[in-house]
Image: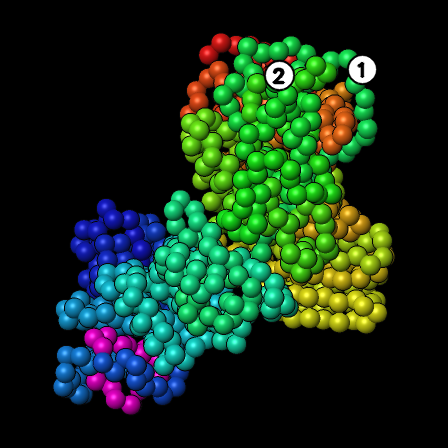
Amino acid sequence: MKVIIEHASYYEKEWLSQVKNIHTLGHTYKLAQLSEEELMQLKEKAVYIEPAYSIQLIGRQEAVPITLAQSLFIIAYIGTKQKAKVDAYYDLETGELQVVRTLHSLREPLFISCYSETGISDATAYLCCVQTLVHLARQLGRPLLVYTAVKSILPAYQYRSLAAKITNHLLQLTWAVGIAYAPYKQQHAYYTPTNRLFEPYEEERLYVEDSFNQAIERSGHLLLQYRSAQKVKKNYSREYLRKSQALYEEFFYKQLPLEVPLYIQLRSEKVQEASYYEEMGFGVVHFEGHPIALLGEKSRYEDFKRILQPMLTMHFEISLVNELRPRRQTATLSELYKVLEKKGIYSGENVYIGLVTTGQVEAYHEALKDETGKSRLVYWWQQEKDEKGNELTNLQMTKSKEDTTFLLGLAGGDSSQYEGVASKAKFIVAQIKEAPISLQTLYGGQVVAGTTQLIDVLIGTLKLIEWAQKQGKPVVICLPFEGPLTGHGGESELERYLSRLGRRLGCTLIVSAGEEGNKRHHQCLLREGEVENEEIIEVKKVEQCFLGFIKQQGLKPFSVQLCSEDGRKILFTALEEAGEKKLGEGINCFSQGFQIDYEKGGGQLLFRIENLPVGRWRLKVKRIEATPYPIEMWLSSQAFSPFVRFEKATTFQSLNPLAASDSLLSVGAYVTSSKTLLGESGRAKEKEAKPDVVAPGTDEIAPCLGGWEKVSGTLVAMGLVAGVVASLYSGRDKRWNSISMRQQLLEWQCMWQEKTYPQLGYEGAFLEKNQFISLLNTPF
């Protein structure tokens, strides 16, 4: 019986001594012809034994691409016997390599057809063939391209097998890349691990629906450029899947008007000097001295698409975030109001409290002035577009519908009537622009005040950090934003840039836990092992437009259907297919389609539904087979869809995506009177509890435009914590960053572990005002 064996490396000599008919493929991989008795003896020592399953050789007659006619490649076709310009044949049954044509030049490719006269072979013969090709490539010092068109006769070994694992191992021994034919709908199965004992292994071969000619031409050029099978696999789709006339195939991108200004990120390995893009008329966004994104009208990108395509990210993505607002009511002050009852020995001296906002701040409010009557707001940057902006000297911000004076007041206000936490700190502010209306409508569902783009938040944050560093002082920056919707799928490149800023010395970035805790905008559609499920979506008001984002870690596709609660009226089928679906009466659905995220190893779906009637609607989700990965869905945040929600929801997936980073200090809120977690305060419960800390978040007095107000919400807790952090900087190590500052707060909370709180529903650090007072009065 012919078998394929994987064993532990220390059994190497024992294999050779016990078995006669054995062929070595590596230190831990063998092929063997075993009797039943030998098989039973070796089973105890082997990690895994796989039978030499039969394979069918398929394919059609092909030829080496003309573009590779002058190259050093060894090109092998394992499948149907080829006839056009073949240089050598390898017979899988006999294992013989026969040269049939002499190369006239060293600059010619060597084309080898690997076949079986019967069209049937087995996995051991196939592995011997791959090993022969690898040895030949190493002897001749040539790069190797192996195109495989085979099919396992036994379905159990079609996708993941020990033979496939060994094939990857063999190809890694030389400068080579493997390409295999597979229909598109089956490709995910080759990359999805199973629970067999030879797992896990990373499948580095390309599985494509392209013909031999197309696949060899494309992968050949990439192999010469990158010299790595992993990079060929990563860039194969990026370089060649853009076949439409538009710069991006994404359905949402095609709906955008040509005049809308867009940020598009650059690929780090392809970036040019900023002047290169500026000559084309683009604005350039920098991070740590390097261009990371361009800003220009969509029409300009289309004009230069042939030049820009290799330099831009594979997928077009808009990351909208919305600036959170507190609950407000007018208040009056008849006597001195102290945010903390007792003042600490540290009060924020020589520290900046920063704020990035789309709103406005009353710079000359009495709580933000010093003893001489001058405003303590010492730096004010106002964005025009991308990195360009003005440093205001008259401190008159662009008028906005929203007021964010309260945040600075809570953190560091000071007057005869009011005392914030860090009353000696100075303030710096970056006022950024709201996102274009067309982007808000398409990627948010509707136009909402305070909606901006994450990249503009990054730009504003950079401006404040750079200014504070020039002054040689630490800075605490409040980022009162929630989102983006697609950020739930994992940390994006922009979020990683923001996290890197949070690790800078002398800088702490504070983000809110968000206010989705009780909004019922998240649900796990399919749990591990489930194949089918239904959830109810409730629409409470007419003319609602909302977005849905579905994410799974695995790659296997799924189907999504929306129908009436009783199932009789089907509104939309196949939401996973890209395009526009119209039902009449203004009810429309726009779907981005199921997309594979090759970098994160998952699948995702973004769709928008307009004018869904009031009522209860059943969302049905189904996948082909059970997998160990859940499928989760998020609806637009409360700002965008206040009247659309799930009937049932999972509270512990309601965290603001920006608060998931370990490099930012995330803050939630609790009800001051009852010591219970504020209902809307977002939270997560995965590797560790999030947010990092929760602080008082209700009924605090704060300054506002023209007077005072009583405010509640997670931003109230953010303002308090920002003041505490600024005070700690003034009395302790000014090099602390977001990570070390969080650690300081968590360690301090540990000293109060004996204290319990009823109905907390949270496992992170829970800080009261008296703990802040104690902390700020403890010498360093």
For disc 2, the marked residue is 371
Q: Nearer the viewer, residue 230 or 643?
A: 643
Residue at image position (47%, 26%) is 474
The numbered dot on residue 334 is 1
Q: Which of 555 and 485 is in front in this view?
A: 485
Query: Which region shows up in magenta?
Result: 71-95
Residue 82, placed above or below residue 11: below
* Secondary structure, magenta segment, majority class: loop
Residue at image position (34%, 51%) is 47
The residue tagged with tag 2: helix, strand or loop? Answer: loop
Name of the residue lying farthest toward the bottom: 84
- Marks 1 and 2, how far apart at CA: 20 Å
Instruction: Name which residue type carries label 1.
Output: Ser
Q: Residue 748: x percent and y percent?
A: 54, 17
| Callout 1–callout 2 Cβ contact below 8 Å | no
Residue at image position (47%, 31%) is 468
Q: Residue 316: x percent and y percent?
A: 53, 61
**94 in the magenta segment:** yes
Residue 521, placed above or below residue 679: below
Residue 230, placed above or below residue 635: below
Residue at image position (67%, 38%) is 360
Q: Quadrant of residue 260?
A: bottom right
**Mark 1 packing: few (<14 Cα in 10 Å), some, or many (20+)?**
few
Q: Nearer the viewer, residue 225 or 704?
A: 704
Q: Which of 474 and 110 is in front in this view?
A: 474
Q: Quadrant of residue 240?
A: bottom left
